[in-house]
Image (spheres, rainbow, N blue to C red):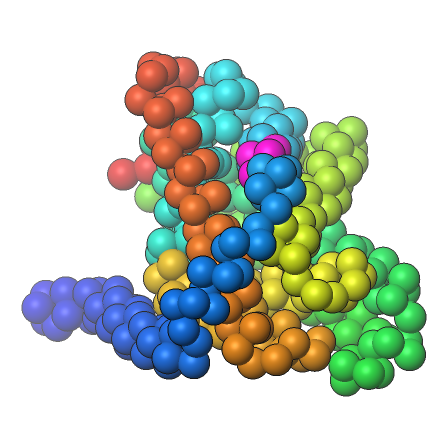
Amino acid sequence: MNSQNESDTGGAPARKWRRAAVLLVVGVAILVWLLSQITLADFRNAWARVDWAVLALGISFSLSATLVRALRFAVLFESRGNLIRLYGVFAQWRLVNMVLPFKIGEVAALVMLKKYGFAGSIAEAAPTWIVVRVFDLLAILAWFGAVLLIAGQEMLREVGMEETPVILAIAAVLAGLGLVFAYGLTALGPFGHDNTSWLAQRARAFRDGVHRINNTRRIAACGILSMLLWGIAIAVPTILQFAFEVPLAALDCLLISLIVLVASMLPVHAPLSLGTGDLIWAGALMLFGLPETEAIVLAISIRLSLIALICLEGGIGTMILLGRQPPPAHQGTAPDE
């Protein structure tokens, strides 16, 4: 019986990593196929046209986005410790999140916040993380709706998109997430009062985390910072398109960034988004009229720039974390074992 239980327990992670390996193979195959459609001269010509000043602007925007992310968590969770060090955690997490397949990076964020002393336990930080992810979805919805309204229905029909169904679909998903979250908090009620089991300790820590963010001003600040964060997140790939002189109007580049951003949230990417991310970029560029060869060259070039940006920021975050001692962890919640 014990061996059977161990087999059952270890089966899910094993299946997850097998799927990741399959996705990696598929992603590499896609990338090889994309590379076979272009020549080295095409790639060299694309980089010869780069506006390095605009590229530097994109780098500065990318760095500021992670700083806003760290500030948002600090405001909502009232985390102790230096903001620069918290920036280091999120900069390092951004790299980890890019490398890991599916949505394992979500769990990694909670582990890192606990490891570096910004949360007493994973369960305590989990409610804050859920709230910021809901705000992320709301911010993306708001930006998507704003761009759709600016773009106008006529232009959207040209690329096969309708604004009303998209907005209603996203709103329905968000409403469903809100109901699930509200039910989950209600379901925690029976735990944590009548025993000291591991589950009860996790439930108490989770409930403590909910109480920590039950503040109107902090939630309002989180909403404002989320809008700023995702405004920057949309601006970075748009600026990179400008840097590589993508022959499209600014509004088209903005819409491409939004399409890629929404598609990148799907949990179907290979590690580093190899192949899958490049295909999404190439498809979005071709959707707006670029020839196949040019779209593939620009897609791979922009993706390389984004990967380099995240690696640079991850390196900065690692140096920050290595150079500073961790602050004391929060008191009053049971540690995760």
| The quadrant where residue 16 appears | bottom left
Residue depicted at x 37% and y 34%: 315
Counting every numbered tag in the picture gives 0
Q: Find out whether residue 274 is within the magenta segment.
A: no
**Image position of 23 (left or right of 160):** left
x and y percent of residue 284 in the render?
A: 63, 73
In the foreground, 11 or 240: 240
Q: Quadrant of the C terminus?
A: top left
| The quadrant where residue 218 appears | top right
x and y percent of residue 118 in the render?
A: 45, 26
x and y percent of residue 140 in the render?
A: 71, 56
**Image position of 281 (left or right of 222):** left
Residue depicted at x 72% and y 62%: 253
Find the magenta span and give its range: 59-64
In the foreground, 152 or 210: 152
**Image position of 158 (left or right of 267):** right
Q: Main secondary structure of the magenta part?
A: helix
Q: Is residue 190 above or below residue 40?
A: above
Residue depicted at x 73% and y 51%: 139
In the foreground, 41 or 224: 41
Q: Is residue 178 visible?
A: no
Residue depicted at x 76% and y 81%: 159
Q: Is residue 147 visible?
A: yes
Q: Is residue 133 above or below residue 220?
A: below
In the foreground, 13 or 319: 319
Q: Find out whether residue 63 is within the magenta segment.
A: yes
x and y percent of residue 160 in the render?
A: 77, 84
| The quadrant where residue 20 appears | bottom left
Q: Is residue 229 above or below residue 294?
A: above
Q: Quadrant of the N terminus?
A: bottom left
